[in-house]
Image (tube, rainbow, N blue to C red):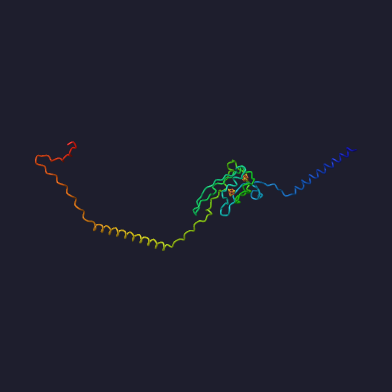
Amino acid sequence: MSSIKEYFSGVGKGLKSLVTGMAVTGRELVTPKVTEQYPENRDTLRIADRFRAELTLKYDAEGRHKCIACGICQMNCPNGTIKLTTKMVDLPDGKKKRKLDKYMYDLGSCTFCMLCVTTCPQDALEFSNDFEQAVFTRDKLVKQLNYRPEPKDDAPAPAPKPAMDPEQLARIKAEALAKAAKIKAEKEAAAKAAAAAQGAAAPEAPAAPAAPAAPAAKEGEAPAAPAAPESENK
Ligand code: SF4
Ligand code: SF4
């Protein structure tokens, strides 16, 4: 008797389990589908905003990023995913400034911990949710984040000079030429006057003293040789 009772009890439990399972199946039959038909649905596919796909620099409308190349993100990255290089640039006001040269990011080694984003003092970084990052080789995962052309420096540029009126420019040029010609003429006149004054004031040069005439040699004699100095033994 007890075995019959156990039998029907088991059948009842089985039916209950079946109904429970079929209820779940039936509920899912009428629930809206969540399976994404990727990549056919690329145009309508929406990834959650907070999905961390790739580190990027934030750019404003003029193409500027806010990175000051302080290196804090590089120091805080636990696995050396970020490598920065910097350069010194001359500003229009004559000062020098260290700027970001290259911001290299290796997506292949990133653990998406967001330490770089949260420690950046400039709020210059963010994660994009662009999830399509599949490539054939790992070296293609190394990306330069400051890839955009660099706009002009933020430092104050010297105010441009106002354009000069062409007539005023021509007048200034004519005045400068006239002044130069006048100075040249004055110099030439002064040089001539100085030369004339020098010519008038200079005395005639004295005649060079005549060389003493050598004594005439007698006919048939050789000219007398100059007297030899007297010997000390004499
Ligand atoms: S991204 Fe931020 S933390 Fe990293 S170097 Fe630039 S300013 Fe510094
Ligand atoms: S998310 Fe983490 S691992 Fe990736 S670059 Fe930033 S600090 Fe490095």
Q: Residue furthest left?
A: 219
Where residue 115 sits: x, y (%)?
63, 46
Q: Of 76 and 39, which appears nearest the observer?
A: 76
Where residue 84 sits: x, y (%)?
56, 45
Horizontal side of residue 33 vs 8, given as left or right: left
Q: Of 61 and 14, which appears nearest the observer?
A: 61
Res 176 → quadrant: bottom left
Tell me the quarter of the image containing the N terminus. top right
Count of numbered badges drawn on the protein: 0
Q: Residue furthest right?
A: 1
Where residue 216 sits: x, y (%)?
11, 44
Q: Of 102 and 76, which appears nearest the observer?
A: 76
Where residue 227 sits: x, y (%)?
16, 40
Horizontal side of residue 109 vs 93, given as left or right: right
Tell me the quarter of the image containing the C terminus. top left
Horizontal side of residue 187 vs 57, given as left or right: left
